Amino acid sequence: MKKNLLIFLTLLLSSLLFIEGCTKQSEDRLLSPSTLSCDTINVQYSTTIVAILSANCYRCHGAVTNGGSGGIILEGYLNLKKWADNGYLVGNITHAPGYVPMPYDGGKLSDCDINKIKAWINQGTKNN
């Protein structure tokens, strides 16, 4: 009898813990406002991508400010397209193994900015 009661209480406690973990509040924490507001559909080079690169990359990889950049210039569509198409841009900004983590002097770009760049590449690196 004690064994059956112990099994019942264990199952009841496990069920309660499982149910408590699966609440609407938990879903809201997973889907934070920054995750929900990251628009990767309406990504355009001239607005979205240039803004990200201007804020994070052009100080070292600009057309004029590129000392110490290893000759990698990201300012200007044709300059960027080469690095986007060969995979180096994504490798560097995602800090993938075998790539130099960029931005070099700062932390990793936000997940949203990385996803926008990936979306632009996946949509064909359009000059729009």
Image (cartoon, helix red, strand yellow):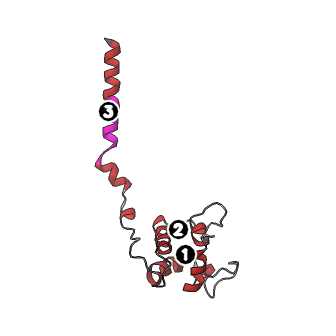
The secondary structure type at the circle numbered 2 is loop
Q: Residue at x 34, y 35 (%)?
A: 17
Residue matched to label 1: 56
Amino acid type of the residue that numbered disc 2 sits on in the rendered structure: Leu
The secondary structure type at the circle numbered 1 is helix
Q: Residue at x 38, y 54 (%)?
A: 30
- Nearer the observer, disc 3 or disc 2? 3
Query: Mark on residue 66?
Result: none
Q: Main secondary structure of the magenta part?
A: helix
The range drawn in magenta is: 13-23
Labelled pair 1, 2 in contact (Cβ < 8 Å) = yes
Q: Which is more N-terminal, label 2 or label 1?
A: 1
Q: Quadrant of residue 44?
A: bottom left
Q: Which is more N-terminal, label 3 or label 1?
A: 3
Real-space Cα separation, disc 3 to disc 2, in angstroms: 40 Å
Amino acid type of the residue that numbered disc 1 sits on in the rendered structure: Asn
Q: Which is more N-terminal, label 2 or label 3?
A: 3
Residue matched to label 3: 15
Q: Residue at x 59, y 70 (%)?
A: 87
Q: Residue at x 34, y 37 (%)?
A: 18
Rendered location of residue 93, percent (x, y): 57, 68
Amino acid type of the residue that numbered disc 3 sits on in the rendered structure: Ser
Labelled pair 1, 3 in contact (Cβ < 8 Å) = no
Real-space Cα separation, disc 1 to disc 3, in angstroms: 48 Å
Query: Mark on residue 109?
Result: 2
Q: Is residue 106 above or below residue 43?
A: above
